[in-house]
Image (cartoon, rainbow, N blue to C red):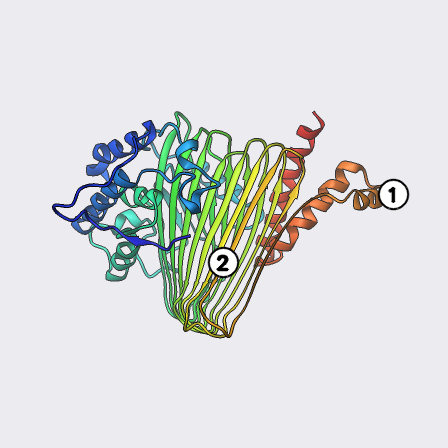
Amino acid sequence: MSQVQAIKPQAAGRPSSVQPLKTKAETALAEAFTQVERQLPGGDWLRQLRRAAAGAFTAEGLPHRRVEEWKFTDLRAFLREAFPIAGDAEPPKSATIEAMVRDALPGAKLSKAFAAFVDGRGVAEAGLGSISELDGAFVSRFLDHPPAWLENEVSEVSGHVGDGVLALNTALFSDGAVLDIANGRSIDTPIALVFGSGDGAAQTVVTRNVVRVGKNAKVVLVECHLEPAAPRQVNTLTQIVLGDGAEVVHIKLVASREGSIHLGRTVAKLGANATYRPFQMVSGNGIVRNDLAITFKGQHSTFDLGSALLVSGHGHTDTTLVVDHAVPHCTSRELVKCVLADTSRGVFQGKVIVRPDAQKTDGKQMAQALMLSPDAEFDSKPELEIYADDVVCGHGSTSAEIDPDLVFYLQSRGIPRDEAHAMLVESFIGEAIDKVEPEDVQEALRGLTRQWLQRETPRKQA
């Protein structure tokens, strides 16, 4: 998968390249920027980036199957009609917000420090005043006159595009979370970013989160995208900057529903001796694509991804990542576990790049799928691009059905067949969940897995 590429305006006097006909959705999205531009937050610096990104999207369009990194997830085919951009709405009552945060990850106690959003607009925050160096957690508050570091980070990503999805995010994002964790801070409680939806018609929601974690700081970040009440097309981007020696656990949860599309991207930069441990869980029957772009900026750092994907119905989930070993002595690990039921489809694309000077790199990735239906499909494309000679790198991929001998063994011990199936699925997914800390969050994730299995068993019996 290509790294981000600069937006380059067409040189004067050069003939324009031939562009394919725009789809109805592409035309609607391009027009949407013109309609909402004046309502979007940000000073002149951001307005210029937005207009450049809107122009890039007009030229690029939505990614499709002929774009290599999107060959398994043809967004131009999936997104046939663009929903209207979500506008300002009546904020929900405090009891509704409390329930939204409480139910985001039951048992994880996220209400101590959180920022809550409904259809792309910040509606509540609590407990973040003593954690973040910023006076507030909604990025929209700071975009007119941002701190220098925030402007630099947003500009670095927003001034570059790899595809139309990133360009759309830059052009249209309305709000999101911003956190600045001071050097040496060790945050005991998880910080929750909870994204919910209101009732009513289908809408497009675009958000941007920016998190800076100082030197030797430690934090657990839980990013929850709740199942929408009505169909949503979500485009969200999270930027994370880890200072030297920082430790970040970043848990992202996506509950999808049929008729909805979730396009998520994480861009992380790791300083020296830093540890970034993301975990991603997807459940439901909608379309979900999670991109990760990880760059090692300092030596002796670690990236360790765990992923648990629970897909049913006609659901489609795609995890695509690029890990850029730009410096020596760094370690990367990726473990993706995918459970596919009915006619669902899972995709994993993982590229590890080892630059010429990145000696002593240690990189391993594994993608595994458990097929609960003969009609399910799993596509795996691991890649290694190695330009150094003193490295240890490897990858693997497997897919299989539940072993009937294991089911028989459990039944012979008096365990009903459906319960035996559930135990084996939970054990399969558990290897990825075991990577998560702290313990109460880990147990809450196991609870989500059990809830999904409980919903699937009656459908399978019907």
Residue hosting label 1: 412
Residue name at image x 43 percent, y 47 percent? 69
Q: Quadrant of the C terminus?
A: top right
Q: Earlier in the sequence, mark 2 or mark 1?
A: 2
Residue 226 visible somewhere in the drawing: no
What kind of residue is marked 2?
Answer: Thr
Tell me how many marks there are: 2
The CA span between labels 2 and 1 is 44 Å
What kind of residue is marked 1?
Answer: Ser
Q: Position of residue 376 (x, y in %)?
A: 61, 36
Residue name at image x 40 percent, y 71 percent? 298
Residue name at image x 65 percent, y 52 percent? 430
Q: Position of residue 282 (x, y in %)?
A: 54, 43
Q: Position of residue 407 (x, y in %)?
A: 79, 43
Quarter residue 201 falls in: top left
Of circles 2 and 1, the one toward us is 1
